[in-house]
Image (cartoon, rainbow, N blue to C red):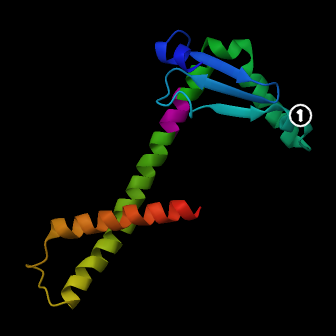
């Protein structure tokens, strides 16, 4: 399956054992770990409206007609949406969070006797970025 996708022999591959249905695209960066999956058994035995919605997703994305442009459109719109989310997150981090932490680092340096002229803005920037990345790593591990 990975070989077919990497060679571009096919744009999409479905892999299933009857219960789990996975849809792989040749355009994703990781051919092995990037896929869309539906547990058909779970979809069929879900309660109430969830069953109908889950089955609709399976039928919509795994039927033959989906391979004539629908899947490409869904993938493109998913990428656009992910990009928008990333931009909004970047905006939030740099407009709200980053400035607060950088101000904290700057205040700490002032509290230790440095004047504003002695405080290196590049050093504050790098310290803040390092702190944010470490914080994301720690919070990501906790989730």
Image position, residue 122 (x, y; %): 17, 65
- Residue 80 lies left or right of residue 122; in this view the side is right
Q: Quadrant of residue 44?
A: top right
Residue that mark 1 sits on: 44
- Residue 121 lies left or right of residue 73; in this view the side is left
Question: Residue visible at 26% across and 84% down?
Answer: 108
Question: Residue visible at 52% across and 27% down?
Answer: 76
Image position, residue 111 (x, y; %): 22, 90
Q: Quadrant of residue 131?
A: bottom left
Image quarter where the N terminus lies is: top right
Question: Over which residues does the magenta segment extend?
Answer: 76-81
Q: Is residue 122 above or below residue 30?
A: below
User: Foreground: 76 or 132?
Assistant: 132
In the image, farthest residue toward the left? 117
Q: Is residue 4 above or below residue 111?
A: above
Image position, residue 119 (x, y; %): 13, 77
């Amino acid at each position: 399956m990975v070989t077919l996708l990497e060679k571009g022999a096919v744009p999409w591959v479905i892999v299933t054992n009857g219960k789990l249905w996975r849809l792989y695209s040749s355009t994703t960066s990781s051919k092995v770990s990037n896929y869309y999956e539906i547990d058909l058994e779970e979809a069929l035995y879900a309660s109430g409206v969830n069953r109908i919605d889950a089955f609709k997703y399976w039928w919509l994305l795994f039927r033959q007609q989906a391979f004539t442009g629908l899947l490409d459109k869904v993938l493109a719109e998913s990428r656009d949406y992910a990009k928008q989310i990333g931009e909004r997150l970047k905006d939030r981090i740099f407009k709200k969070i980053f400035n607060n932490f950088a101000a904290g680092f700057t205040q700490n340096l002032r509290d230790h006797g440095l004047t504003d002229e002695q405080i290196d803005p590049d050093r504050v920037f790098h310290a803040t970025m390092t702190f944010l990345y470490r914080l994301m790593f720690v919070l990501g591990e906790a989730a």
